[in-house]
Amino acid sequence: MYAARVRAEALALLQRGESLSTVSRATGVARSTIREWRDREPGSRPGACPRCDDLQIDEEAYAALLGFYLGDGYIARAPRYYFLRISCDLVYPQIIEDVVGLLDRIRPGGRVFRVPRTGCLDVHSNWMHWPCLFPQHGAGRKHTRPIVLQPWQRKIVESCPADFLRGLFHSDGSRSINTVTRRFPSGPRTYVYPRWQFVNVSDDIRDLCAWALDLVEIPWRQSSWKTISVSRRDAVAALDALIGLKS
């Protein structure tokens, strides 16, 4: 019989992603015993899945990561696992850190990789359970197949719409200063104002963005077939406060 503190120490090491052998050497406990402790505590297994093991999920982190996945992410199959990659512009280092932090919160103890590419960086994580958390995964590009949230996903977004919008706009969105000149009998007049735009060729993903904006009562319009714009000064200020600027 081992003291409770030894068992707690072993489970903490597993939670950090250490192997059974490493934990056994660190604690002096047999691998078989540590494995038994691990299997009795699903939440302590590095590979535990919130959906498969009916565990609590960090809803704010999940809503944001869902937005990033729908915007600039994809899931693909490797021989022994799936991998999730979120493409991030190198111009926005804080967004890169945001995505890394979200992956850490959703899968504590899992390794997160940064894969440089020309002009961008892919934040990458390997796990067999990514399709469980993102059932929108499928063959082909997202705009070629239906993207419909499951009821449990909709419930999370309804609870955390600002986080979901942060993921969408910080991946496939932009904040810019728009300049418009209008001609009047008295002469031309120029208007300068900030605006957010979300650009995505998937009708379903644009509809989800519009739905989330409605949840937080931010007015929007579809300014082109693939673009949702938030242009009113009060609306832009409200969205700024909810999701923060891209940086």
Image (spheres, rainbow, N blue to C red):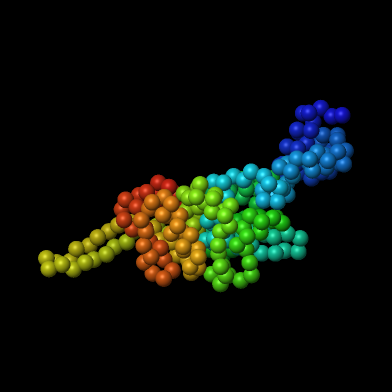
* Residue under the point 50% across and 65% down: 204
Question: Residue 171: percent from the left, percent from the top?
Answer: 50, 58
For the question of whether residue 26 can be seen, the reply is: yes
Q: Is residue 165 left or right of residue 127?
A: left
Q: Is residue 133 left or right of residue 160?
A: right
Q: Nearer the viewer, residue 71 or 91?
A: 71
Q: Report the quarter where the N terminus lies.
A: top right
User: As drawn, which residue projects farthest toward the left?
Assistant: 186
User: As drawn, which residue projects farthest toward the front?
Assistant: 151
* Residue under the point 50% across and 47% down: 160
* Residue under the point 41% across and 71% down: 225
Q: Nearer the viewer, residue 98 or 169?
A: 169
Q: Nearer the viewer, residue 88 or 53?
A: 53
Q: Quadrant of residue 148?
A: bottom right
Q: Quadrant of residue 227?
A: bottom left
Question: Residue 117: percent from the left, percent from the top?
Answer: 59, 63
* Residue under the point 36% across and 66% down: 223
Q: Give the number of marks.
A: 0
Q: Quadrant of residue 177?
A: bottom left
Question: Residue 60: percent from the left, percent from the top?
Answer: 54, 46
For the question of whether residue 64 can be seen, the reply is: no
Q: Is residue 51 left or right of residue 68?
A: right
Question: Residue 140: percent from the left, percent from the top?
Answer: 61, 71
